[in-house]
């Protein structure tokens, strides 16, 4: 079977070209964190909606406390959520709590710590002058009615959800979470905890990929382990494409693999078999399988070696999922790090991706060191890595040199 030899950049461009943004849907505020807005959010009301006190203290007329100390009668008290039942007359004060509406006639608030309570609260001695408007939040101080609060393309984070709640945006158009079918293939995989037979191994890729999909903000759908049976695999793939937005498989894409996966996908889907100039994760398959309604659904075939599966997900599958969900920052954040020890490699025409451990040092720079064995089957060593170093073709990076790394965790 012919394979297209490409760079990682070319492979990513091929995948992204076939993974367009999903159509927007209406999402509820409670389910919106992590979603990307598909339309501008315009404020239907002012925030705050009324003038209120910025602190606990006494509402006064600034002119009445122009000379201090001064004693004023306390004629009322206003708590947050309440309203004044009378206006403030000249020469009076009203006890007021943070967030409570300003009473008519008052134009400033004196901090309670700058006052002295007299006659069991019936009077107050004020020790500080205030200017008109001091410690008063005006209507629209935060958001003015009719203004664009957030533009389309904004990722809803917890604080943004709070702002949306403050303007009563209970539902709005956003890009949904992609439904991602995840399945592994192979007679040798055991995922039910039963004893291993000759040549059998524990399933690990699917478990890892389901978690990576969820971490990317998508909805992972577990299609299990499919045995090396063409009919069973075809049934699973067709069900996956009919119910999900994208399918991710693990195993069966290498040159030496038993050809059940390649045979089925080559027959029922439009596939491109890639040989990417990277290490690990050289073999990769990409294509489309049409749903019953004719809509094409992307299929990403990741290699079966665990580390290769992890790296190909990070470099190809994760960007595809993020693009489908409306994100513009598709790759993990990158930083120029310092290699605390030499990162060695040999010249072979490929870009190498080494799994490393990184942290910020006293010099304010990000330092990385080897995270353990780099074999494509050695997932345990890679599992604790929090950085992925990109090493161009050549001899590697000497100790103390700069190296570009992708940050796998915040």
Image (cartoon, rainbow, N blue to C red):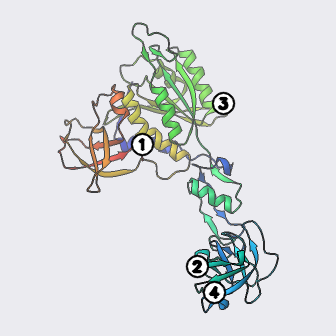
Where is residue 379, by image quadrant?
A: top left
Point out the frontmost of discs 2 and 3. 2
Q: Position of residue 292 (x, y in %)?
A: 66, 30
Q: Residues within 10 Å of mark 4 (few under 14, many from 20)?
A: some
Q: Nearer the viewer, mark 3 or mark 1?
A: 1
Question: For the N terminus, which image quadrant?
Answer: top left
Q: Are marks 1 and 4 in contact (CB under 8 Å)?
A: no
The numbered dot on residue 292 is 3
Where is residue 296? Give x, y as percent.
58, 36
Image: 288 above or below 33: above
Instruction: Answer with mark 4 or mark 3, whichever residue precedes in sequence.
Output: 4
Q: Which residue is mark 4?
A: 132
Name the residue beneath numbered marker 2. 114
Task: Tell me if residue 141 can be seen.
Answer: yes
Q: Earlier in the sequence, mark 2 or mark 3?
A: 2
- Residue highlighted by disc 1: 12
């Amino acid at each position: 079977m012919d394979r297209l030899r490409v760079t990682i950049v070319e492979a990513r461009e091929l995948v992204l070209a076939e993974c367009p943004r999903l159509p927007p849907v209406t999402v509820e505020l409670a389910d919106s964190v992590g979603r990307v807005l598909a339309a501008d959010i315009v404020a239907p009301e002012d925030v705050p909606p009324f003038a209120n006190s910025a602190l606990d203290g006494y509402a006064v007329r600034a002119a009445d406390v122009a000379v201090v100390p001064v004693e004023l009668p306390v004629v009322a008290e206003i708590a947050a959520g309440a309203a004044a039942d009378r206006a403030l007359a000249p020469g009076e004060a009203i006890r007021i709590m943070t967030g409570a509406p300003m009473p008519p006639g008052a134009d400033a608030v004196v901090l309670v710590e700058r006052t002295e309570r007299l006659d069991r609260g019936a009077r107050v001695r004020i020790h500080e002058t205030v200017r008109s408007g001091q410690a008063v939040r005006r209507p629209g101080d935060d958001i003015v009615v009719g203004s664009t609060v957030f533009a389309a393309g904004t990722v809803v984070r917890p604080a943004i959800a709070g702002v949306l709640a403050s303007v009563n945006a209970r539902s709005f158009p956003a890009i949904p979470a992609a439904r991602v079918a995840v399945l592994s293939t192979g007679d040798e995989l055991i995922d039910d905890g039963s004893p291993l037979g000759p040549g059998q191994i524990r399933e690990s890729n699917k478990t890892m990929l389901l978690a990576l999909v969820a971490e990317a903000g998508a909805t992972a759908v577990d299609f299990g382990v499919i045995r090396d049976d063409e009919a069973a695999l075809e049934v699973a793939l067709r069900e996956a494409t009919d119910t999900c937005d994208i399918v991710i498989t693990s195993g069966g894409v290498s040159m030496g693999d038993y050809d059940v996966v390649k045979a089925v996908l080559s027959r029922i889907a439009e596939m491109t078999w890639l040989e990417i100039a990277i290490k690990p994760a050289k073999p990769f398959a990409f294509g489309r399988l049409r749903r019953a309604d004719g809509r094409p659904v992307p299929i990403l075939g990741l290699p079966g070696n665990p580390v290769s599966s992890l790296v190909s997900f990070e470099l190809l599958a994760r960007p595809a999922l993020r693009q489908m969900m409306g994100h513009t920052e598709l790759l993990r954040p990158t930083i120029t790090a310092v290699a605390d020890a030499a990162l060695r490699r040999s010249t072979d025409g490929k870009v190498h991706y080494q799994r490393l451990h990184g942290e910020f040092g006293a010099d304010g720079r990000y330092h990385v060191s080897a995270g353990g064995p780099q074999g494509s089957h050695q997932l345990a060593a890679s599992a604790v890595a929090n950085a992925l170093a990109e090493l161009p073709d050549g001899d590697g990076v000497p100790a103390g040199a700069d190296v570009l790394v992708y940050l796998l965790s915040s």
